Image (tube, helix red, strand yellow):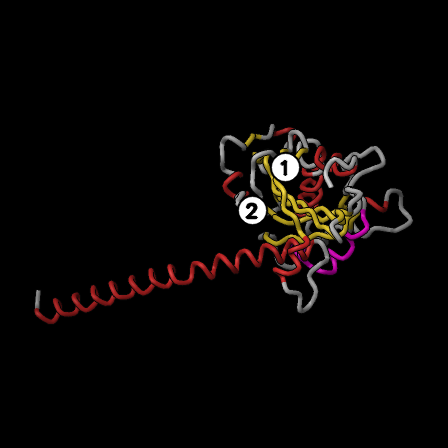
Amino acid sequence: MSDTAGKTLTVAAVLCGVCSVLVAGAVVVLKPKQIINADLDFKKNVLMSAGLLKPGTDINEAFQQVEPVVINLETGAIAEGIDPKIFDQSKADKNPDYVESIPKNEDLAGIKRRAKLQKVYLVKKDGVLDQIVLHVYGKGLWSTMKGFLSLDKDAITVRGFNFYSHAETPGLGGEVDNPKWIAQWPGKKVYTEELTPAIDVIKGNVDPGMVNAENKIDGLSGATLTSVGVENTFRYWLSEDGYAKFLTNVRNGVIQ
C-alpha cells in the first residue's frame, strides 16, 4: 500500500471516529430534550381530544386538570398498588404478566393482543369529573391507527377525539385526522340505550333525520377499509373486552 493510500485511509478512519463521537454526544445531550418534547406531545394529544387545547394554551398548566389512573380492564376498577405517574403503557403492552391474546373471532380491532392494565385520563373541573379520555388503537388499511377518545361524564357522549398516529393513504384513509371529519364526532353516542357499542361509520353522509343518527359517522370517501377499521376499533375498545366495565363504574359513581 502506498503512503498516499495509507494516509487517505488514516484520515478517513479518524474522520469516522470523530463523527461517531459527535453523533453519540449529540444523542446523549439531546435525549433529555427529546423526552420532554415527547411528553409535551403526548399531553397535547390528550388535551386536544378533550377540546382543551386552544391557541396559546400552556400544555403543562392545562394538563393539571387531568388525573391519570391505571385501570384493570377485567374488573373495570382502578388497579391497586400501581402509581400512574411511573406506569409505562408501552412496557405494559409487552409485559407477559399483563398481556392477553385476543381470540381471532373477537379481535374486531385487529390488534391480536392487549394489556389488561390501561392508563386512562380523568379530566376534572373544579375537582369534579367532567370527561374521561381513553386510549384506543386498531388496524386500518395499512397501519395501526392510534388515538384518544374523550367521553362526557355520562360515559356515553363523545366530547372529542383525535388520531395522533397512523399511516393511512393521504387524501383517502389519511382523512381520519382531518379536522373537518373529526368535527362531526362531538355529541355522538357510543352506546345504544341498552349500552351496546354503537358507533357506525356509514357509506356516504349522515342524515340527521335517519334512525340512530346519533350513533352514525360519515364514511371516508374512497377509504372503505379504513372506515371499517375506525368503526371496529371503537366497537372493540367500548366492548366488555375493552373499557365497558370501567365506563359502567364511572356511570355508577364508583369512579369519580
Q: Nearer the viewer, residue 68 or 112?
A: 68
The residue range painted magenta reads 173-188
Q: Nearer the viewer, residue 69 or 47?
A: 69
Q: Is residue 203 visible?
A: no
Task: Identify residue for label 2.
Answer: 85
Q: Is residue 231 above or below residue 21?
A: above
Residue shown at 78% from the left, 39% from the top: 198
Total tally of numbered discs in the picture: 2
Task: Identify residue for label 1.
Answer: 71
Residue shown at 66% from the left, 29% from the top: 75
Q: Residue furthest front?
A: 127
Tell me where residue 165 appears, x and y as whole percent.
59, 53
Q: Is residue 98 above or below residue 171?
A: above
Q: Is residue 95 visible?
A: yes
Q: Which kind of residue does numbered mark 1 sit on?
A: Ile
Secondary structure, mark 2, is loop
Instruction: Tell me the CA gap for discs 1 and 2.
Output: 13 Å
Q: Residue furthest left?
A: 2
Q: Which kind of residue does numbered mark 2 sit on?
A: Lys
Tell me where residue 120 appears, x and y as whole percent.
64, 44
Tell me where residue 212 appears, x and y as whole percent.
86, 42
The quadrant in which residue 247 appears is: top right
Mark in front: 1 vs 2: 2
Q: Nearer the viewer, residue 89 or 201?
A: 89
Q: Nearer the viewer, residue 139 or 100?
A: 100
- Disc 2 packing (10 Å; few <14; some 14–19; many ≥20): few
Q: Are marks 1 and 2 in contact (CB under 8 Å)?
A: no
Secondary structure, mark 1, is strand
Tell me where residue 217 appears, x and y as whole percent.
78, 49
